[in-house]
Every structure is written in C-alpha cells, then in structure tokens.
Image (cartoon, rainbow, N blue to C red):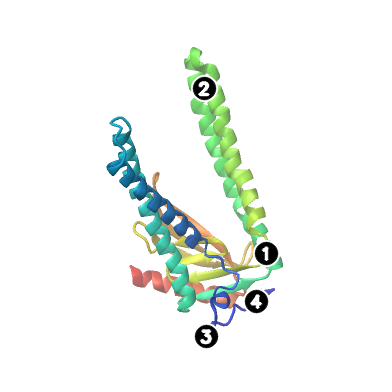
Amino acid sequence: MFNEPPDITNAKTNKKDVYGVIKNRQRLIFKGFLIATICMIIALFVFIFWIEDIDLKPAGTLLSLFLSIMFLIITIIFYKRSRAIEKALENNEYLARWHFDKEKWEEFVNREYNYRKAQRKALFVFLSVITVIIFSVFILVIDEAQLPMFLTMVGLVLMYAFLAFLAPFLSKCYHKKGEAEVLIMKNGILLNKQLHIWNVPTSKFKHAEFKEKPFPMITITYSFYDRTGPREYTVVSPVPNEREGRKVVEQLKENGRIDR
C-alpha cells in the first residue's frame, strides 16, 4: 500500500527520520570523485617536483593535470546533485514525497518495464536493420574485409540486444527490491535511487502529464545535451492517487513557466 512519508516537521527529527528509506547515492559518488581528485592533484605535484625522468615527467604531468581537472568537474557536478537532495529533504523544499511499500513498488517497476518494452523493441529493430543494410554493402563491395565486417555487424546487433533487452531486465530486477520513495522537487525528481534534474546548464523542463493508462502515473519530460546533441528523456513515476498526481503536474508546469 501507499504509505505516508516520515514526519519531518519536528525540528529535532534526526537525519535517519528525515531521509527515511531514501539513499543519496549522489553523495557517495561525490566522495569517491573527491578522493580521486585529491589523489590526482598529489600525483601532479609529485610529477612536477619529485620526478626527474625526462621521458616520464612530461607525460605524467599532463596526464595528472588532465585527470585532476576532469575529476574536479565531475566532483562539483555530483556535489550539486547531492546538495539538491539534501536541501529538499532537510528544508522540506519539495512538491511531493511518496512512500511505496515493497509490493506496490515491485508492481510499478514491472509495469514501467512493460510500458517501455515496445519502445525498446522498436528502437532495436530500427538500429539493427540500418546496421545490417550498411554493413551488407561493405561486405559485398570489399572482398578482403568480409569476415571483419560481418563480425562487427553481429557484434553491434548483439550490443543493441543487450542494451534493449538484457540491461533493462537486470535493472528491473535490481530496482524492484524493497520499499521505495519518490521525491519530486521543483527542478528534479528522485525516483527511488535514480536522480533526474533539469536546473543545470543545457537542461530544461519540457512537459509533465498525469496518465491513467496503462497504469496511474505521471510523466515528466526534460531536455538536455550530451555528446550526440540535444535529447529528451521522459521519467515515469507512480502516484498514490489521481488527486496527488494532478496536483504535482500542475505545480511542475507552473514552476516551469516561472523558470522560463
């Protein structure tokens, strides 16, 4: 059944009561990259001041500098993501917080998996057909590279199959274990262990909607840029009831209009 989240109105509520079953994985990742950043900075100073090998010093210095900068950027990103969760929970700054017991959460995970299955299957078929067509041309034209091209084609199709079917299935098995909480913030949503935020550069809230079929849920779509260019992603979240779902959708839409 749907349960009320822990009462956090009391100023003396301890941290365990505030977080409930929510696990802030972003903080663990932040700490890991912080340690890695410190190690790379130490390595950078070692290469600059203590290593005298003329062959090793330039390469080691450049590599340490590059990794230090990269890890520092990642550390800052995950620190901000971690603080978004902490601030929302500790200051009670969220639109909704819903707690689901093991049975209800498992039901949602199974339904969400089936909801996306058709999309994954269509994408797998599309990519596989395009790949087979392209590589078939190379196989017919380039005689000396027929076997490598064929093996590459098969490898790509197998990779598509893994990403479309096996990986989502393993994710479903992992995420459906135990009770869970959904935390909906003004600029993000924590869906059990998965954090999605759209108040960062190049990201933007697009749309939110309450749907009754194939099961009661809200969908939140946001846009962002990655190495392939602009993309959109839709988050699916269960709702305790229609009233709560529609209320959160209206709040998200209103907040999106304000941010624009």
Which mark's residue is nearer the viewer, 4 or 3?
3
Q: Is residue 219 above or below residue 121?
A: below
As measured in the structure, the alpha-carbon distance from the residue carrying label 2 to the one carrying label 1 is 45 Å
Q: Name the outermost residue toward the top.
A: 144
* Image mark for residue 178: 1
Residue that mark 3 sits on: 12
> Identity of the amino acid at label 4?
Asn
Q: Whole-percent x and y of residue 138?
A: 48, 21
Q: Residue at x 57, y 40 (%)?
A: 124
Q: Is residue 133 above or below residue 251?
A: above
Label 4 close to label 2 by CB (< 8 Å) = no
As measured in the structure, the alpha-carbon distance from the residue carrying label 4 to the one carrying label 3 is 22 Å
Q: Earlier in the sequence, mark 4 or mark 3?
A: 4
Residue that mark 4 sits on: 3
Q: Earlier in the sequence, mark 1 or mark 4?
A: 4
Q: In the picture provided, is 194 more to the left or to the right than 175?
A: left
Residue count near mark 1 (Cα–Cα under 10 Å), binned few <14, some 14–19, many ≥20: some
Q: Earlier in the sequence, mark 2 or mark 1?
A: 2
Q: Residue at x 50, y 58 (%)?
A: 234
Q: Residue at x 38, y 53 (%)?
A: 38
| SS class, disc 1 | loop
Residue that mark 2 sits on: 149
Q: In the picture provided, is 144 more to the left or to the right than 75?
A: right
Q: Earlier in the sequence, mark 4 or mark 2?
A: 4
Quadrant into which the C terminus falls: bottom left
